[in-house]
Image (cartoon, grey):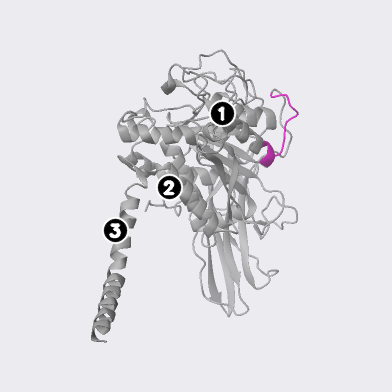
Amino acid sequence: MLKSRRFWIAGVLVLIVFTLCFPLFTLRESSAHEAFDTLPDFPCYRTLDTVFSDAASLAINHPNLAEWLDIGDSWIKQNSGGTSGYDLNILKLTNKNTSGIKPVLFVMSALHARDLAPVELNLHFAEHLLSGYGSNPEITWLLDETEIHFLLVANPDGRAVVEEQIASGWAGADGMNARMKNLNATTCPTQPSNTGTDLRRNFSVEWAGGYSGCTNIYSGTYALSEPESSSIQAYLDDIFLDYRDGDPSKPVHTGAMSLFLNIESYGDTITYPFYYTDSPAPEEAELYILANKLAYDLDAFPDNPDALLHGTPEDYVYGELGIPALAYAIGGSSEGQYFMNCWDFDHDLNANLNMLIRAAKASFAPYSLPAGPEITSFSIQSDLENRQTNWFLSAIAKNNLYKLPLAPSPIVASAVYSFDLAPWQEGAVLHDLQPEDGFWDEAEEALFAELDVSTLQPGQHRVYVQAALVNGTSGLASAGTITITLEPLPTSTPIVDGYDNYLPIINK
């Protein structure tokens, strides 16, 4: 009996000690795991497995806003019977409770395996949107009214090899030696390290062959010969409307919306079609203004491609579907080239997130909105006077937010606000804003209005603001919120101040 009691007491003591120490064990185990969540020498870049795990978790944690979709297989997975290799996954963000035809922003990264910064920027953008939904009026509006599709790693087989090359030191500090192509093992059987297809040259518009399968510019045996490019193009056909009648030289239909953005390393440029010819695209002027708008506040410049490329996804999306398609080459030669160094990546992150927000706003009418005045420094405040709540809106409309300023900059000629429906949506009731100095005569105008809330029911309401040029060209809008109460309250809504509130997300 005494012996049994001693065993019982000892067991309780062991249980107590284990209970007290268990957090230390788990913390130690978690820390050891986290040490391998980022790439050696690059603490700002998550590993391939961590990228996939974190993206899938976003869909689990935000079921009304996010989906993690399987759109196809990598070359290794297709040719191994599924025993190895990777799925091609899309992270799709939109409010599932809002309906109607929504513009699509498609953001792709790592079509070339060694592009590290594009993957991390793409995932940061998704995390930024989801973390701001419900508290940031701009982000809430965009996820309510658009679809944003993220192809985080378009070449996962190749990315896995790059991570091995980084760990072994083979890749080099700048990534010049790192793998670029996919892992198609049939293209160069005598030199396994040089095998594979350049996926950026494997899409269907103006595909061209003729290169050795051992070179980095090998474009495949035929257009869409690779499972990665084939799956991507099929998905693009599924999510984008078609605004062109087949011939890339014909103008697009009026009312075209949506936007395709391929983020790659490196070059500090935002380029636009055509890539396969020096001949100008039918909408070259509009594409240039779009690229110039997105390049504002970045190190990148709008530019034509510096070399001819056949079979690009950009030429497919623009040439076949009539949707603007740009390539953003992030980083410069002094910032780490293909392996952008972490200091520069972190330093530029906020500006890059702002650019992607602009891209989402432009997707409503990408051929026209970038040419109009952009709303910044938008705020709504309220005060209580004679038991009546008065709402005051202020904003700045700027028509000079371009990397390369327009000469001369057209003047801002008008501005409107609307409740709950954007100014371009059917049924929206438009109210005028006024310039603070009383004159519409500058490329930058400070605006104000006392909001007419007489027709609004109690509850939260979205307020849109948009400005226009003399010729009627409207620019990128902005959105805020107000809450109408039964009893007037002397409170102010949070200020939405341009893009300054888009703070970077720091890696765990």
Residue 272, numbered label: 1
Would you identify the image quadrant in which residue 133 lies? bottom right
Residue in the picture at 52% in, 21% down = 186
Q: Earlier in the sequence, mark 1 or mark 3?
A: 3
Q: Could you say which quadrant of the image residue 8 lies in?
A: bottom left
Q: Which mark is residue 50?
A: 2
* Residue 210 located within the stretch drawn in magenta: no
SS at mark 3 in the image: helix
Q: Of tags 2 and 3, which is closer to the observer? A: 3
Which residue corresponds to the image point at 54% horizontal and 57% vertical from the top-left?
A: 60
Left/right of residue 295 with respect to residue 388 in the rendered view: left
Residue segment shown in magenta? 237-248
| Other-residue count near label 1 (Cα within 10 Å), few / some / many at <14 / 14–19 / ≥20 | many
Sequence-first tag of 1 and 2? 2
Q: Residues within 10 Å of mark 3 (few under 14, many from 20)?
A: few
Task: Report how far apart the C-alphas of labels 1 and 2 lie in the structure.
Answer: 32 Å
The type of residue carrying mark 2 is Thr
Instruction: Between label 1 and label 2, give the one nearer the viewer.
Output: 2
Q: Secondary structure at mark 1?
A: loop
Disc 2 crowd rating (10 Å Cα; few below 14, some 14-19, many 20+) is: some
Kind of residue indicated by mark 3: Arg
Q: Amino acid at mark 1?
A: Tyr
**Residue with the mark numbered 3:** 28
* Residue 481 vertical placement versus 126 (above, below): below
**239 falls in the magenta region:** yes
The residue lying at 47 percent from left, 50 percent from top is 53
Q: Mark 2 or mark 3: name the one nearer the start of the chain.
A: 3
